[in-house]
Amino acid sequence: MTETERRARATEAFFGRRKGKTLRSQQAEALKTGLSSLKIDLAEPAPEDLAQLFSSSVGRIRLEIGFGGGEHLLHRAGEVPSTGFIGVEPFVNSMAKLLSRVGELGLSNVRVYDEDATQVLDWLPAASVDQIDLLYPDPWPKKKHWKRRFVSRVNLDRFHRVLKPGGLFCFASDIDTYVNWTLLKCRDHGGFEWTAKNAADWLTPFAGWPGTRYEAKAKREGRSSAYLTFRRV
């Protein structure tokens, strides 16, 4: 097995279904036009300076993997227009919703990709990203499915390669087993330093946190969330 094949197998099918309810005409049009203008073309070499991907001037680059309903990405993109955001989401309905809002809000610091995030990670230049957000990823709770969890040695290698020295990897989840899994994987990797100084640090939402639908669901069902920040060393 080649290195490329090994990497692909180690991360295959980390996401679930690709499409939900039939899109409304407005959503379908937003998806069509939005992807044609904002989707990153991996057939082209990545620019050495990722700021060139954006129509507005940006000084930092942030990658969100699996943005779900897009609440967090949209909030951050509006909050910090000087940061360029790359959002990856294979679920068609979520992508359509985000692109509709990007157009309505007139955001010029957002680019997207609608397939496997590992393809983007392998395309990005080394030390080109300031922050990676992995928020409420699919926990794949059954042990036989743990190999499909996005946090793995292979993907942490990818994170480590594309993050700038001192760059951040932020992870949030309401599933205790996945939180513990992530802490152990990052510890064993050796390339990431957990920034928490006390218990309150990882129980406190990230600064400026807008909340997400997944967090709200967890609260309704009586589950607390953990917010982990790792620094690339």
Image (cartoon, grey):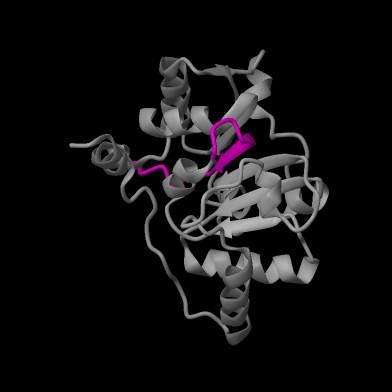
Residue 72 visible in the picture: no
Say left or right for 231 vs 161.
right
Name the spot of residue 104 as percent of width and height, x first: 77, 71
Position of the C terminus by quadrant: top right
Say left or right for 165 vs 75.
left
Residue shown at 64%/57% (left/top)? Answer: 111
Name the spot of residue 68 as percent of width and height, x first: 55, 56
Q: Report the front residue among 25 and 31.
A: 31
Q: Residue furthest left?
A: 1
Q: Report the front residue among 51 and 64.
A: 51
Q: Residue furthest bottom?
A: 25
Q: Report the front residue among 25 and 59.
A: 59
Say left or right for 14 vs 210.
left
Query: Looking at the image, is 77 positioned above or below residue 97?
Result: above
Q: Report the front residue among 218 and 25.
A: 25
Query: Looking at the image, is 21 positioned above or below residue 78?
Result: below
Residue shown at 69%/56% (left/top)? Answer: 110
Name the spot of residue 1 as percent of width and height, x first: 18, 37
Q: Is residue 136 magenta?
A: yes
Residue 21 visible in the picture: yes
Q: Is residue 97 magenta?
A: no
Residue shown at 63%/29% (left/top)? Answer: 168
Residue shown at 76%/34% (left/top)? Answer: 207
Region rendered in magenta: 125-141
